[in-house]
Amino acid sequence: MAVCLSLQDIRSGYGQVLALQGVDLVVDEGACVVLLGANGAGKSTVLRTISGVVRPHHGAVRFRGQDITGRKPHEIARLGIAHIPEGRGIFPGLTVMENLRLGTFGLAEAARQERPSVDRVCALFPALRPKLNDPGASLSGGQQQMLAIGRGLMSHPAVLMLDEPSLGLAPVLIDQVFEALRQIKAQGTTLLLVEQSARHALALADHGYVLNRGTVVQRGTASELTANLHQAYLA
């Protein structure tokens, strides 16, 4: 299987504080890879480094063989990497449709893609269709997470990176979000997922990595990590 994303000896962080201490990671085309670990392990920093929000001090980030290390976030987004941050980050004063349209901002042929993209989002998240003209602030927490994912899909990304998509959601909504992610993966989108709900994440994932204090302490298939889940979190 072809490699979609790879990190080689990445050391990055905030100021002089390194949150990642030499991370190596590979994500194959069409796969779902999950990053597991305790709070502060560096999982979110991995996504931010890939998307260009954090500039690495050392190492290389490659997308489909192209070195994208240190490129600006909008440039990386245009290449086909969408980042759904923790906390959703929707614009509460804009309508749902306006929030979705922001997912095409600055992309070539955005106007032509917009309607099919909205239809795809509403097919994945039917609860959003009757809300398209409502302000984002009127949505429930679960609907806001659906909107955040939908906005990321508007650009038809090759890679969708999600940071804690289940955070703060009721169990029934977590199930709905992960069912949508299964459909997105089945449609050919590569997924890189940071998630505290290891049960849901490993049920979706092909492979996973466990981070602790900025280093990879365990890696393997989803079934291997599931079998060693207790040990993984104590690593």
Image (cartoon, rainbow, N blue to C red):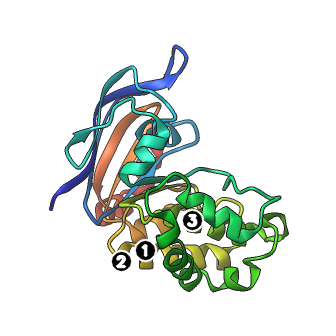
SS category of the residue bearing label 2? loop
Q: Earlier in the sequence, mark 3 or mark 1?
A: 3
- Residue 177, quarter of the rendered image: bottom right
- Residue 50, quarter of the rendered image: top left
Q: Which mark is residue 187?
A: 2
Q: Nearer the viewer, residue 186 or 202?
A: 186
Is residue 60 toward the left or the right of residue 100 in the image?
A: left
**Residue 144 in sight here:** yes
Picture coordinates of residue 197, whole percent (x, y): 55, 61
Residue at the spot 44% in from the left edge and 63% down from the top edge: 109
Mark 1 neighbour class, 10 Å CA radius: few under 14, some 14 to 19, many 20 or more: some
Q: Nearer the viewer, residue 225 or 127?
A: 127
Q: What whole-number distance in Å separates the C-alpha atoms at marks 3 and 2?
A: 15 Å
Q: What whole-number distance in Å separates the C-alpha atoms at marks 1 and 2?
A: 5 Å
Residue at the spot 41% in from the left edge and 61% down from the top edge: 157
Quarter of the image with the C terminus is top left
Residue located beneath label 1 in the image: 184
Picture coordinates of residue 221, whole percent (x, y): 27, 60
Q: Amino acid at mark 2?
A: Gln
Residue located beneath label 3 in the image: 149
Q: Is residue 130 above or below residue 9?
A: below
Picture coordinates of residue 19, whole percent (x, y): 49, 27
Q: Residue furthest top?
A: 16
Q: Amino acid at mark 3?
A: Ile
Q: Nearer the viewer, residue 188 or 205?
A: 188
Is residue 14 toward the left or the right of residue 142 in the image?
A: left
Callout 1 touching callout 2 (CB < 8 Å): yes
Q: What whole-number distance in Å separates the C-alpha atoms at marks 3 and 1?
A: 10 Å
Q: Earlier in the sequence, mark 3 or mark 2?
A: 3
Is residue 89 toward the left or the right of residue 176 in the image?
A: right
Mark 3 neighbour class, 10 Å CA radius: few under 14, some 14 to 19, many 20 or more: many
Residue at the spot 66% in from the left edge and 76% down from the top edge: 173
